[in-house]
Image (tube, coloured by chain):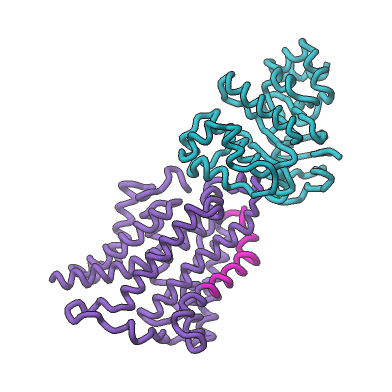
Chain colours: A purple, B cyan
Amino acid sequence: MLQLILFNLFNGLIIGAFYVLVSLGLSMILNLSNVINFAHGNFLALGGYLAYALIPFIGFWPSLLVAPLATALIGYVIEVTMISRLYGRDPIYSLLLTFGLAFMLQDACRYIWGVNGLPLSVPNNISQPLSQTYFFLNAYRLFLVGIVVVSVLGLFAFLRYSRMGMRIRAGILDLDTVSALGINVRMLRSLNFAFGIFLAGLAGVLAGGQIGLNPNMGDTLLLPSFVAIIVGGMGSLVGTLLGGLTIGVAAALTAVVWPAGSDVVVYIIMAVVLLVRPRGFLGEEGMQ
Amino acid sequence: MSAIEIEGLHTYYGKSHILHGVSLRVAEGKLTTLLGRNGAGKTTTMRSVMNLTPPRQGRVTVFGKDTTRWPTFRIAAHGVGYVPEGRRIFPNLSVEENLKVPLERPGPWTIPRIYQLFPRLEERRMNRGRQLSGGEQEMLSIARALLLNPRVLILDEPSQGLAPLIVRDVFRIVSQMRDEGISVLLVEQNVRMSLEVADHAYVLDDGAIVYDGPAAELAADEERIQALAGATAEEWQEAASA
């Protein structure tokens, strides 16, 4: 029983780690650009597929960095050419645009790489289980958790200590004043968007190595990641982090006693949080 | 060359016509003040200069460049320091972080020099913006604009809501900036103190300029000042056009 709980706890941590990567990116984009990026899950899939295409040429490890960077670059171009034109309008416009982009990216992946799933091969030396009793612990999964921890710490350090990070945090509450202080806020938003997409691309590569690739692979992660943002509190990235881990672990632990309920529990948590503390764990009062 | 030249500005908020052809000029190296009662259009004029509220008609020239259609950040990067109404401190950032947000234009102003001028800000450097008093927030807002190393500084009602003693400090610093060679456009409701420090004065009412002349001349007209300082809109208009 203990082993089963540990197994599910660890699984929950892995799923939570994916929710964290996806929801942090979504949250950054939502905070600074007021755009709900419905295409986020498809950027994730694109990251996985780009890694698949790159691995034969440059190997797994470099692809882990290059594929998310390439995804971020595509995201940057899309933000500059399309999404940025809708800033200042009713959010429904950008919502519809990203909704359309989601279908386009998904079909692009289908067209190039086919409708069936593809395996993303992980180097042999990290895919073996580390012990017989704890068969679920293999080096890849530990490594996956490690990568997520490092990226999240890196992101928080960047936002906390770099001038650009300070400008992003300032812009979340008052972008006009940041602009009036001479900062190119168009560029700031574009780069911030690209950072968010980088995290999605990274999640795509890591998820590909874990469960394989398919054109819809981001969809199952997207909705719970929105839930993570709401549960954690709008406007707070630490809240998003906690929200992602909470629902990941809660879903996995529910699976021990009630396997069918593991999806539902995510939304039950959201409902309870909204009823008891509508602004979420760490949300600012009055954030829209 | 003028620091700022505004010609025939018409600005709307939605359908309401706020500025009816405002023209004014901020001479280089001088302190120009723009006075007027609440709702006269002073803040709208400043927001139009920064293109935060784009004017529908008219032209803004900053140091010889037509900036009317420039995005706000480009106008600021051209050398316009802006201290907005209500100070607009970033409440979630520390004092020091607030000071690191502005673009680093080369020039004499650095964070250590800011701390020399405002020792209080150094004492509170790790505090969040939302924890500061009104006076400290005003200092921070001015400091933040100075770190851009502006050639012209726009201050929108810096004395608003401050204790009289702190208002003195603010006006002392503003005239010190002019003595440093920064052109200043000071928007105020505090008529007497503004005229004390200003070289040139404009009075705005109902979205149009009703006085344009040396500050000393307006300051000498005690009757008019009394009328400007506390009056109803009708009395005010009468006094302004007298």
Query: From what the image shows, is residue B130 above or below residue A58?
Result: above
Stretch of the chain drawn in magenta: A69-90
Determine the residue positioned at 73% across, 25% down. Answer: B35
Residue A278 in magenta stretch: no
> In front: B189, or B107?
B107
Quarter of the image that includes the N terminus of chain A: bottom left
**How far from the left and from the top, in percent, is residue B166?**
58, 23
Query: From what the image shows, is residue B154 above or below residue A171?
Result: above
Residue located farthest toward the left when viewing the structure as drawn: A1
> In front: A287, or B153?
B153
Residue located farthest toward the top when viewing the structure as drawn: B223
For this view, does A123 lie left or right of residue A182? Answer: left
Residue A79 in magenta stretch: yes
**How far from the left and from the top, in percent, is residue A149?**
37, 65
**How far from the left and from the top, in percent, is residue A33?**
55, 56
For this view, does A121 lie left or right of residue B100? Answer: left
**How far from the left and from the top, in percent, is residue B232?**
69, 17
Task: Examine the residues drawn in magenta and state their main secondary structure.
Answer: helix
Residue A137, picture quadrant: bottom left
Residue B173, picture quadrant: top right
Residue B22 visible? The answer is no
Determine the residue positioned at 65% across, 67% down. Answer: A81
Query: From what the image shows, is residue B176 above or below residue A38?
Result: above
Determine the residue positioned at 43% across, 52% down. Answer: A236
Determine the residue positioned at 39% across, 82% down. Answer: A212
